[in-house]
Image (cartoon, rainbow, N blue to C red):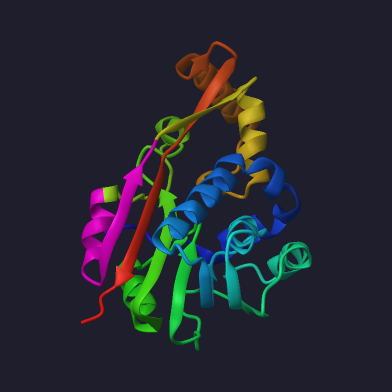
């Protein structure tokens, strides 16, 4: 049983980092680009009547999709209501027939748009509590043959922090996601990769994760001695030629709603 995620904590952390997220979240931006390419490979016509994006954040995936596809109605959802202002910069650059912002937790949000051609989500599903229920909800709102495409992270993600601190999200493996999603969808793409980001120091690494809002992993307040212990352990265990490293473990999935 996975522990429940504190959505208010997640909302607060991401709200505080909206301005810095775009410049710091380089892995998530690369994942958005890759996910958009996967979607376009599955939909050569690159035309969608109705799209729902879950976890739109600062607009990285939205920009990648609108830069590649023709979209009549784009629905963007995010837990952080203030993110709608970040999306305006994307809307100023790309044409879309109509735009709707849906603020709130996707797991409890009602109503959602019906007869969707595409539901897409980048680097968000790891913050949900009930993936089975989420998959069921998405399946109910997609057209038959509609596409559901997402990225999330696997168990090796930020393993360095969890090894030292003993805290971290309970990530699903790719196989577990395939089993869960396979009950509702026909899986067409499923793959993973492991990336290492390098930083000049553990302090620079901590600045990076704080600037992307993912420091929900570090919920406890640190005393000076605990902070210095963390820095020393990180240097000792995870040094690289240029300083220290941090592991990211992106997962990519694309699937179709069954037509029968």
Q: Is residue 123 visible?
A: no
x 29%, y 49%: residue:
174
Looking at the rendered image, the quarter that the C terminus falls into is bottom left
Residue 66 x/y as whole percent: 63, 64
Q: In this view, does 2 lie to the left or right of 104?
A: left
Q: Quadrant of residue 103?
A: bottom right
x 36%, y 55%: residue:
253
Nearer to us in this view, 145 or 241 = 145
Decide: is 66 above or below 126.
below
Decide: is 75 above or below 215.
below
x 38%, y 82%: residue:
143
Nearer to us in this view, 206 or 154 = 154
Decide: is 73 above or below 238.
below
Q: Can residue 169 be seen in this view?
A: yes
Identity of the residue furthest to the top in this view: 241
x 54%, y 26%: residue:
230
Q: Is residue 255 left or right of residue 121?
A: left
Identity of the residue furthest to the front in this view: 45
Q: In this view, does 59 lie to the left or right of 147?
A: right
Q: Indicate whether residue 133 is drawn in magenta.
A: no
Q: Quadrant of residue 99?
A: bottom right
Nearer to us in this view, 165 or 33 = 33
Q: Give the range drawn in magenta.
A: 175-193
Q: Indicate whether residue 176 is drawn in magenta.
A: yes
Residue 115 x/y as whole percent: 43, 86
Residue 29 x/y as whole percent: 59, 47
Decide: is 235 above or below 25.
above
Numbered disc total: 0
Residue 32 x/y as whole percent: 54, 52
Looking at the rendered image, the quarter that the N terminus falls into is bottom left
């Amino acid at each position: 049983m996975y522990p429940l995620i504190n959505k208010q904590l997640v909302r607060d952390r991401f709200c505080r980092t909206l301005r810095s997220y775009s410049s710091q979240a380089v892995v998530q931006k690369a994942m958005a680009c890759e996910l958009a390419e996967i979607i376009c490979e599955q939909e050569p016509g690159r035309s969608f009547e109705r799209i729902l994006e879950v976890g739109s954040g600062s607009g990285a995936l939205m920009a990648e999709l609108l830069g590649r596809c023709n979209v009549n109605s784009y629905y963007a959802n995010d837990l952080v209501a203030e993110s709608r202002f970040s999306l305006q910069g994307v809307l100023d650059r790309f044409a879309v027939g109509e735009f709707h912002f849906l603020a709130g937790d996707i797991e409890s949000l009602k109503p959602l748009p019906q007869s969707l051609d595409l539901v897409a989500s980048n680097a968000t599903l790891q913050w949900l509590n009930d993936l089975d229920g989420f998959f069921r909800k998405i399946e109910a709102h997609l057209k038959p043959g509609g596409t559901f495409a997402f990225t999330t992270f696997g168990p090796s993600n930020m393993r360095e922090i969890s090894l030292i601190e003993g805290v971290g999200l309970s990530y699903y493996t790719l196989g577990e996601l395939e089993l869960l999603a396979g009950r509702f969808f026909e899986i067409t793409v499923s793959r993973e990769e492991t990336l290492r980001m390098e930083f000049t120091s553990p302090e620079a690494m901590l600045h990076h994760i704080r600037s992307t809002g993912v420091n929900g992993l570090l919920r406890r307040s640190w005393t000076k001695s605990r902070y210095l212990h963390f820095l020393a352990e990180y240097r000792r265990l995870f040094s690289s030629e240029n300083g220290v490293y941090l592991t990211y473990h992106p997962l990519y999935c694309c699937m179709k709603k069954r037509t029968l």
